[in-house]
Image (tube, rainbow, N blue to C red):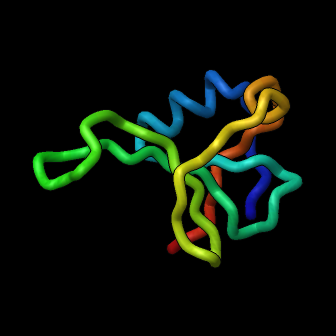
């Protein structure tokens, strides 16, 4: 992963809304957060964040420490 500018969670959320994936640097390399925006075929009716890793995709349950972190970075991992 290429080093990029550290971000607050607010900045990371803006990146998610722009279609990018984000992560914290201390996470395993394949772990990243993405935004799912439902369409007419979705069972969900509102956007939500999920975590993706080698184990699959699950809803993301954020912690207070993650929300307050100032070291969020863009994920350059590919699927």
- Name the spot of residue 36 as percent of width and height, x first: 38, 47
Q: Is residue 60 above or below residue 47?
A: below
- Name the spot of residue 70 as percent of width and height, x first: 82, 28
- Name the spot of residue 13 as percent of width and height, x first: 55, 30
In the image, farthest residue toward the front: 43
**Left or right: 39 as drawn, with respect to 25:** left
Judge by depth and name the residue closer to the eye, 57 or 27.
Answer: 57
Whether residue 46 is visible, yes or no, is yes
Query: Which residue does the image show at 62% across and 33% down from the upper left?
Result: 12
In the image, farthest residue toward the right: 26
In the picture, the quarter occupied by the N terminus is bottom right
In the image, farthest residue toward the left: 40
**Left or right: 2 as drawn, with respect to 22:** right
Query: Which residue does the image show at 18% across and 46% down from the upper left?
Result: 39
Query: Which residue does the image show at 84% across and 31% down from the upper left?
Result: 65
Whether residue 6 is visible, yes or no, is no
Picture mark count: 0
Q: Is residue 17 above or below residue 55?
A: above
Quarter location, residue 35? top left
Judge by depth and name the residue closer to the eye, 2 or 67.
Answer: 67
**Left or right: 17 as drawn, with respect to 40:** right
Quarter location, residue 26? bottom right
Q: Is residue 75 above or below residue 15?
A: below
**Left or right: 39 as drawn, with respect to 64:** left
Q: Is residue 75 above or below residue 38?
A: below
Query: Which residue does the image show at 64% across and 56% down from the upper left?
Result: 32
Judge by depth and name the residue closer to the eye, 51 or 5.
Answer: 51
């Amino acid at each position: 992963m290429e080093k990029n500018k550290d971000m607050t969670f607010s900045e990371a959320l803006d990146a998610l809304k722009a279609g990018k994936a984000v992560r914290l640097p201390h996470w395993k390399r394949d772990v990243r957060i993405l935004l799912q925006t439902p369409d007419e075929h979705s069972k969900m009716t509102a956007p939500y964040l999920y975590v993706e890793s080698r184990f699959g995709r699950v809803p993301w349950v954020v912690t207070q420490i993650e929300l307050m972190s100032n070291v969020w970075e863009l994920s350059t991992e590919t699927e």
